[in-house]
Each structure stands twice: as C-alpha cells, then as structure tokens.
Amino acid sequence: MIERPQNHRALPIQRIAARGLLIDQDSQHLLLMRIIVPDTGDSHWVTPGGGLDHGETEYACLVRELKEETGFTEAVEARPVWIRSCCFTFDRIEHQQKETFFWIPTKKFLPLQDQNVDEIEAKTFQEFRWWSAAEILESQENFIPTDLGVHFDLLLRHGLPENVIDITT
C-alpha cells in the first residue's frame, strides 16, 4: 500500500474497514501479515482485516476477514480500541479508508489463508508472524500504521482505553 496524505487531490474510493489486533494472551505478541504492494513491490506488515461488504457490519466484516486471511474461526470477543483514517493506492486504485482496530485476545495459532481469496490477495499476502511490541519498535521493517509499535506498546503497558482512540497521523 502506498499511503497518501489526507489532502491528496485524486477522488479516492471511500472505504470502511475492520482490522483485528489478534493478541496472544500468553506472550503478548501481535499477529501481523506481510504484504507486497502490487503497485510498488514494497513490503509492509499489517494487521489482518479488510473492507466491509455492502450491508455488512464492522463486526461481521472482522469475523469474515479473519477467517479468510488467517483461518481464525474462534468466537471473536472483539473490542474496538483504535480508529484511523488513511489514503492509499492499491492495484492502481486510490482509496480513502476509515478503519476500526479491534482488540482480540486469543491463543497463539498457526495462521492459514483461506483458499478462496481473490487473485490479487493471493499475490499480495506473503507470510505471517507473531511480533512483540519491542520487536516492532526495534525493527527496520515497514508497518501500517507506521506507528503501530508505539500504539501496541501503549495498549500493553496501560491496558485497553475506556474510549476508542483516534490514531490518525
């Protein structure tokens, strides 16, 4: 994904998304997916999730996306903790996205991508990894959001917020 400033001139597709912060309860590691952006070939680590289908709620989208992208099918006890607005280009299409990040405590599992992902997703998704906050903060890898390590570390140190926090930069 190529992130753009909020004031980018092109008229992007408006998109609402739900993203999962799958947290291993024992080790406090966060599951991330490495993607390769088709437009640039750049590599980024992102949280699982995606855009809402027509008529779909954020929660329903979250459950569907987690199953498709990671094979996660447990009952989801998800709590929204962050919101963010961003602009990006994906497959030569500009998007303006409003996303909600949901805290999901779980046990560490081996992610398995759904065989029904579309062709672009199949080429984009590369690998999964469980990351500690310290590993994210110390890494030279690219993360989306770019300050993911800072926000994740704050959640671990201070607990879940009473109200959803806007992490838009």
Image (cartoon, grey):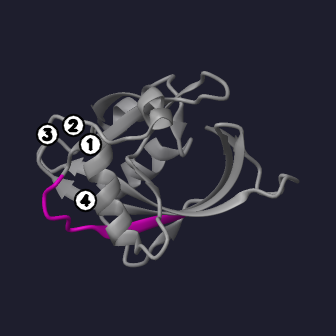
On the picture, is 92 further left or further right than 146?
Answer: right
Q: Which mark is residue 4?
A: none
**Front tag of 3 and 2:** 2
Q: Earlier in the sequence, mark 1 or mark 3?
A: 1
Q: Secondary structure at mark 2?
A: loop
The answer to if 75 sits in the magenta stretch is: yes
Question: Measured along the vertical axis of the image, is residue 111 above or below residue 14?
Answer: above
**Which amino acid type is marked by label 1?**
Thr
Q: Which mark is residue 111?
A: 2
Whether residues under marks 4 and 2 lie with C-beta atoms below 8 angstroms apart, the answer is no
Query: Which residue is disc 4 drawn over?
Result: 104
Q: Which mark is residue 109?
A: 3
Q: Is mark 2 in CB contact (under 8 Å) with mark 1?
A: yes
Q: Is residue 149 left or right of residue 89?
A: left
Question: Residue 70 shows which numbered tag?
Answer: 1
Residue type at mark 4 is Ile
Residues marked 3 and 2 touching at CB (< 8 Å) = yes
In space, the residues marked 3 and 2 are separated at their CA atoms by 6 Å
Q: Where is 34 relative to 65, above or below? A: above
